[in-house]
Amino acid sequence: MHRVKRLEHLKRPLESDVSIALADWLRAHRITFVHIPNGELRPAKENKKGERYSIIGQKLLKMGVQPDFPDYLILQPPPTVLGCMCAAFELKRIGEKLRDGQRSWLRLLKALDFVVPTDAHGIPRELAGYDDAIRQLKLWGYGKR
């Protein structure tokens, strides 16, 4: 896993670097997943009022992209969590937190019997970086070949 080694040398890796390393780990463990990169940077323009907008972003919304939808869906049951068919989570850089809309999506998916990462009070939380993501996935029983 050469990308994980690359992360170790970065002081604060970009979310895209962490996402690539995480995708490598998921593939290596034959875990069926999808990554939905809703927040990637897109070219932006400025309107007459000076407000920034993205033509690509507007088109994606028209096509059905849902703002704040979680980054990852794992499409197989978590081995250690009974009654759940899938997992969903939002990957963040260390120090970044969920937006309200992201937390709302995770609450909805949890109510629909997805397993989502939660804090000690049962409130959905982000996975902060590669190590946190791998730790949570292993708690759910993923990654055991």
Image (cartoon, rainbow, N blue to C red):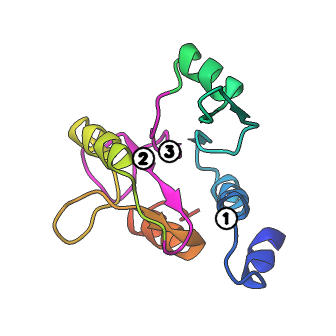
Label 2 SS: strand
Q: Which residue occupies 29% across, 57% down?
A: 124
**Corner quadrant of residue 104:** top left
Question: Which residue has dot 3 on it?
Answer: 74
Q: Report the quarter where the N terminus lies.
A: bottom right
Residue 39 is inside the magenta segment: no
Question: Which residue has dot 1 on it?
Answer: 18
Measured in 3D between alpha carbons, the distance from the residue under mark 3 to the one under mark 2, in whole angstroms, is 6 Å
Measured in 3D between alpha carbons, the distance from the residue under mark 1 to the one under mark 2, in whole angstroms, is 17 Å
- Which residues make up the magenta segment? 66-95
- Point out residue 106 in the picture as x, y percentages from the top left corner: 33, 45
Which residue is more in the foreground, 8 or 48? 48
Residue 69 is inside the magenta segment: yes
Position of residue 27 in the picture relative to residue 63 (left or right): right
- Point out residue 49 in the picture as x, y percentages from the top left corner: 59, 30
Which residue is more in the foreground, 145 or 111? 111
Q: Residues within 10 Å of mark 1 (few under 14, many from 20)?
A: many
Tell me, yes or no, whether the two marked residues, 3 and 2, touch with CB atoms within 8 Å: yes
Q: Which residue occupies 45% across, 40% down?
A: 68
- Point out residue 16 in the picture as x, y percentages from the top left corner: 70, 57
Q: Which residue occupies 41% across, 47% down?
A: 87
